Image: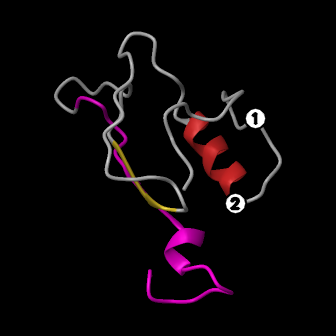
Amino acid sequence: MKGFDEGGVSLLDKANVLMTSNLGNASSHKDNNLPVLLAGGGFRHGQHLAFDQNDNCPLSNLFVSILQRHGAETDRFSLARAPMKGLEIL
């Protein structure tokens, strides 16, 4: 994706790839503290972000960050009222 030019920007910088699970702990079937892998989209990668397991931010904050990165003027998505902290844009 990095090798494809999309008007002076690589396709990798314009696209996001998101992989996650529907369970944070499969042995107890808990759906909090989900593992999430995000690539592309102009975010700085190569880092591990860990959040407070007892006072975690909603996953929808990540979706607000992605929407804003791609030009949508919003600060709301489902439960989210702000972008996810810790994500840095290149």
Vertically, is 81 above or below 13? above
Callout 2 secondary element: loop
In reply to whether residue 65 is colored magenta, the answer given is: no
Give the x, y percent position of residue 74. 80, 42
Q: Amino acid at mark 1?
A: Arg
Quarter of image, res 28? top left
- Helix, strand or loop at label 1? It is loop
Residue 38 point in image, percent of width and height: 42, 53
Compared across the picture, whether 34 is left or right of 41 comes to left
Q: Nearer the viewer, mark 1 or mark 2?
A: 2
* Residue under label 2: 70
Q: Within 10 angstroms of label 1, few (less than 14), some, or many (20 or more) residues?
A: some
Residue 9 part of the magenta-drawn span: yes
Image quadrant holding the C terminus, namely bottom right
Secondary structure mainly formed by the magenta segment: loop
| Placement of 39 over or under 78, stated as above or below | below
The single residue placed furthest to the top in the displayed view is 54
Single out the residue that lies furthest toward the left: 27
The residue under label 1 is: 76
Q: Are marks 1 and 2 in contact (CB under 8 Å)?
A: no
Nearest the viewer among 41 and 55 is 41
Residue 1 in the image: above or below residue 40:
below
The answer to which of 32 and 51 lies nearer the viewer is 51
Tell me which segment is drawn in magenta. Answer: 1-25
Dot 2 crowding, Cα within 10 Å, few <14, some 14–19, many 20+: some
Q: Measure how far apart labels 1 and 2 are at the Cα level.
A: 14 Å
Counting residues from the N terminus, which is met first, the one under dot 1 or under dot 2? Answer: 2
Q: Horizontally, is 41 left or right of 8 in the view?
A: left
Left or right: 33 as drawn, with respect to 87: left
* Residue 41 spot, x, y in % from top left: 54, 62
Front residue of 38 and 29: 38
Q: Residue at x 54, y 70 (%)?
A: 13
